Amino acid sequence: MSTRARPATVRTAAVVVTVGAATLLGPVGQAFADVEPGPYTSTTWSSGIVLLQRDARVEGGDLVLIGRYPIHSTPDGGYVDLFPGHRVVLISDGHGGYTGPAYMGGVEVGAITLTPQR
């Protein structure tokens, strides 16, 4: 009977430790920010040259630009996958706007700026 009890005891102890750690560390987790809803001017840059400037808006957790793209929250703003392999990062500029790098296939190819329209 002791050989059966031992694996069960080990499993139970592992579960208790895991749940305990999750309970202790869970509330400490990473703080998340949201990209504020509202109208913006979106400017796409590459090598210091403006490639595209157009009206955009953040609505219901989505960046509405050419299409509607979910914004994934990060501690300082968020990121958007515009299509497979193309990601833009939106970092709060502290003045109501967002700016960050644009990646294509993991390689930085430019930048994006969201400037609030007031």
Image: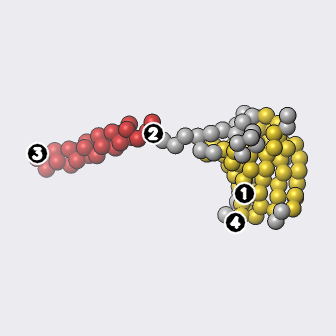
Q: Residue at label 4?
A: 107
Q: Residue at label 2?
A: 28
Q: Nearer the viewer, residue 114 or 82?
A: 114
Q: Indicate which label's residue lies in the foreground, 3 or 1.
A: 1
Q: Are marks 1 and 2 in contact (CB under 8 Å)?
A: no
Q: Residue at label 3?
A: 1
Sequence-wise first label, 3 or 2? 3
Residue depicted at x 37% and y 38%: 24
Residue depicted at x 75% and y 39%: 96
Identify the element where label 4 is drawn.
strand
Residue depicted at x 74% and y 50%: 99
Residue 38 visible, this angle: yes
Q: Is residue 92 left or right of residue 5?
A: right
Mark 2 crowd level (few <14, some 14–19, many ≥20, 10 Å Cα): few
Q: Nearer the viewer, residue 18 or 117?
A: 117
The x and y percentages for residue 53 are 88, 50
Identify the element where label 3 is drawn.
loop
Identify the element where label 2 is drawn.
helix
Q: Residue at label 1?
A: 101
The x and y percentages for residue 32 are 58, 40
Q: Farthest front residue?
A: 95
Q: How far apart are the alpha carbons under marks 4 and 3?
A: 59 Å
